[in-house]
Structure formats: structure tokens, C-alpha cells
Amino acid sequence: MTPLLIISIFIIYTVLLFAITWITSRKADSQSFFIGNKASPWFVVAYGMIGASLSGVTFMSLPGWVKDTQFSYMVVVLGYLFGYFVIALVLLPLYYRLKLTSIYSYLEQRFGFWSYKTGAGFFILSRTLGASLRMFLVINVLQIFVFDAWNIPFWVNVLVFIILIILYTLKGGIKTIIWTDTLQTTFMLLALVLSVIYIARDLDISLIKLVSTVKESSASKMFITDWHHERFFIKQFFSGMFITIVMTGLDQEMMQKNLSCRNIKEAQKNMFTFSGILVFVNLLFLFLGALLLIYVQTKGVVVASSDDLFPTIAIKYLGPLAGVVFLVGLISAAFPSADGALTSLTTSVSIDFLGLDRRKGITERTKTRIRYVVHLSIAFVFFVCVLIFSKLNDKAVIDKIFTIAGYTYGPLLGLYSFGLFTSRKVNDKLTPFIAISSPVTCYILSANSEVLFNGYKFGFELLLLNGFLTFALLYIFSRKGEKDSQ
């Protein structure tokens, strides 16, 4: 594939995206941006959330990750399913009952000002880092296969991508994203299925034979029973469950889409439908990863890193059409992770820190101007973070994201658990210090776990330890009280 063909595909897809943006953002106001005027069809939200949840990380990093972790990630996915049930049955009813725009305002009602700001602050930190990593993964592919050939610097590539995200999210916000996500999910899933077909065709093996080949290979190993191992299956399951609770249920980006549904019943139908489909789609991505390994072994292909496995084979070995399919899928997976993050971070900063929803006597025009400034400022932060991550690319991006989640979402897990399952009153002014001390302690324990715990390695369950430490410290410095109405 030539760089000109690749960039042409990118431009055509972007034009299509902007056409949808133009249609959906007409007459949009602040309520459209933040909660879609509470008019989003649940089935559209459910379908679009598949692409938003998977993102470019799953599309590229997960298949390559099979080389190091086999199918053990599927145990995490099964944990996801139970986590989504908790969100649908516990968290969504709470958010709808309190009529929240930002889910972190619950913390103010339950604990106080400093707890509220701490929760929102940790979300902003976590989502900024996670979204930047996801953007880096996709932008890096475009750099390798397009911009390097034209001697265009990496920072120009990053700037172009972020400007496009700004332009189509600036006005419509969540109202636009609900519909653009459906387009992106469609192309991403189509690319996934077609990639499997192209690999089978190039290997001259029927799809039925491929299934049995994958099943018999070492890559299909799902359950690791050594409790010392960082991917011990029980740890994987519960880590997946709580990763979902925090990265979806306690995440403004994902909940903002749910809160745009007409009512709680539709939001719950969205969550149940979306979670069931997601299990199957993740299994298909792992299957693709195993096929890629079989292809590498058969053809003698050499790749620099696991994240390069899928793009290298798709673009260089499977022919132009397969390369086009891969690029469309990658672009489709990339935009949802960036646009949703930018919109949710704009919402959190605007509501949680600037209090746009509480200001009296302020015109809609002024609110819009403030929101634009916030939007552009966050986009600039993304730009800087992606440039920094380009210097630190030393392991699978999906692994980095879960590691970051373990440290940054842990305090949120502890705060919400304490609020929902106890009636005690926290020392609100101490909450920021507790929220910082917990991940610091977890880092020290993780770095020295093999020495301290007889060879034990922390994996994704670091999130649980972080949440537990936050909960325990909140309890120690709390007092008896009557639980607030929820």
C-alpha cells in the first residue's frame, strides 16, 4: 500500500464522519453536549459503546498480546460481564435517581467538597493518560506507514489527528458521539471479520480448520492455575469485574452515554445488551491474535513488537484490499476512544471544577464560550501527553492502560464503595491525602512483591488492593453517621 492510498482512505472516512457531525450538531446546546438532551435511543448507545469500549487499543494491541498472554485475557472479559451487571443494577439507578450530569457530584452529596474534587480529579488524570495512550497507538501506525515516507514529523501527525477530533466534537458533544460511534463500531467489526477471512484465505485453510488449529495451539490457553502468576485465573476474573466497575461505572465518559438515554430502564437495557455482545467480540479478537501468530510461524514474518503484529501483516503481507480493511477498522476504533474522552473531560472540568451547571445569571452563549476554552485546553494536554508517550513505548499498550487504571481508578473504587456500603462520615479534608497515599503504597508493594510475598507478582488485582487501602483509610478516619439519602 502506498502512503497516498492510506491517507486517501483516512480523508474519505473523515469526510463521512463530519457529514454525520453536521447533521447531529445542528441546534445543539450545552444540554446536548453534556447529556444529549436525554433523547438517545438505548439500542444506538449500546451498539456505539462497543466501539468506544474496544478502541484502537483492542483492535491493535489485543491480537498481538496473545503472544505473551495466550487467551488468559478472556477470563478478564468474563469478569467484565459480572461488572456490567453491577453497573446496571447498582450504579445506574443511583445516577438516575440523583439526576446527575457529572457522576462525581455524588461524592459531594455523600462526603463533601474535597472528596468530590478528589474523585473528579482522579478521573481527569486517569482518562487523560488512558486516552493519550490509545491515541498514541493509532497515530504511531499512521506515522510508520504514511508520514515517515513523506518525512513529516510525528508532532504534525499528532496535531492533525487532534484537530480533527476537536472539530467534530466541539459543538455537538455527546449528542454527536452517540451517532458517530455507531458508524465507527460498524466499520471496526467489519474489519475484524474480514481480517480473519483474509488470513484464512492467504494460509489456504478453511475457517473451520482454523478454529480447530487455534484450539489445539498453545495460544488458546485460557486458565493459568499457578497462584503466584500475575495472570492467575481467579485474580484475572475479579480484576476484570472491578476493572469494568471503575473504568465504566465510575468513568464519566462511559456513564455520560448511559445518562443520555431517556430513562433508567433504557439505560439498563443498553448495558445488558452491550455487555453480552462485548464478550463475543473480545473472543473474536483473541482468535484473530492466535491466527496472526500462526501466520507468523508459517510465513516466517518478523515484527518489532507485539503491537506491530496486526498492522505489519495486514498492510505488508495480505494485499492492498486487506490493508484498506485494516486501516478503516483502525481509524474506526481510534476515533471513539479520543472523542469520548475529550467530551467527558470537558464535561467533568466544566461541571466539577467550573460549576457551569450551578452558575446563575450566565447566558448560554457565555457557557458555550467557556466550554470551548476547556475543550481546546484538554486537547492541548492530549497533544503533549501523546508526544511524551512516543518516547516510552516499551510494552503492549493495553497492558499499560490497565496498569494505569490500577493506580488511578483505585481511589475511586474505594470512595464509591465506602459511600454505597457504609453509613459513616469521612473526614472530608483528609480524602485527597488518602487518595494519594493508597496508590503510592500500592506501587511500593508491587515493585517489591516478589521479595515481600514469596515470589508473588501483582497483576490487574492491584486495582482491588488500591481500592481496599482507600476504603480502609477512609474507615479509620471516619465517624459514625446517618447515611445520606441516595
Image (cartoon, grey):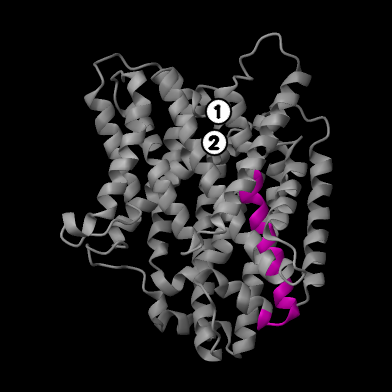
Q: Is residue 19 left or right of residue 115?
A: right
Q: Is residue 338 above or below residue 367?
A: below
Task: Identify which residue is drawn at 55% across, 34% down.
Answer: 265
Q: Which residue type carries mark 2?
A: Gln
Q: Is residue 365 above or below residue 324?
A: above
Q: Give residue 83's position: percent from left, percent from top.
A: 41, 46
The residue at the far top in this view is 361
Task: Identify which residue is drawn at 41% across, 17% down.
Answer: 112
Residues marked 1 and 2 touching at CB (< 8 Å): yes
Q: Name the chief secondary structure element in magenta.
A: helix
Q: Give residue 230's position: percent from left, percent from top.
A: 30, 61
Q: Earlier in the sequence, mark 1 or mark 2?
A: 1
Where does the magenta region start and end?
Answer: 316-339
Q: Give residue 46's position: percent from left, percent from top.
A: 60, 47
Which residue does the numbered mark 2 point to in the structure image?
Answer: 252
Nearest to the observer: residue 74 or residue 21: 21
For residue 85, say whether it is visible. Answer: no
Quadrant of the drawing holding the N terminus: bottom right
How packed mark 2 is, by other alpha carbons closer than 10 Å (few <14, some 14-19, many 20 or more), is many
Which residue does the numbered mark 1 point to in the structure image?
Answer: 102
Q: Is residue 121 above or below residue 22?
A: above
Q: Is residue 403 left or right of residue 29?
A: left
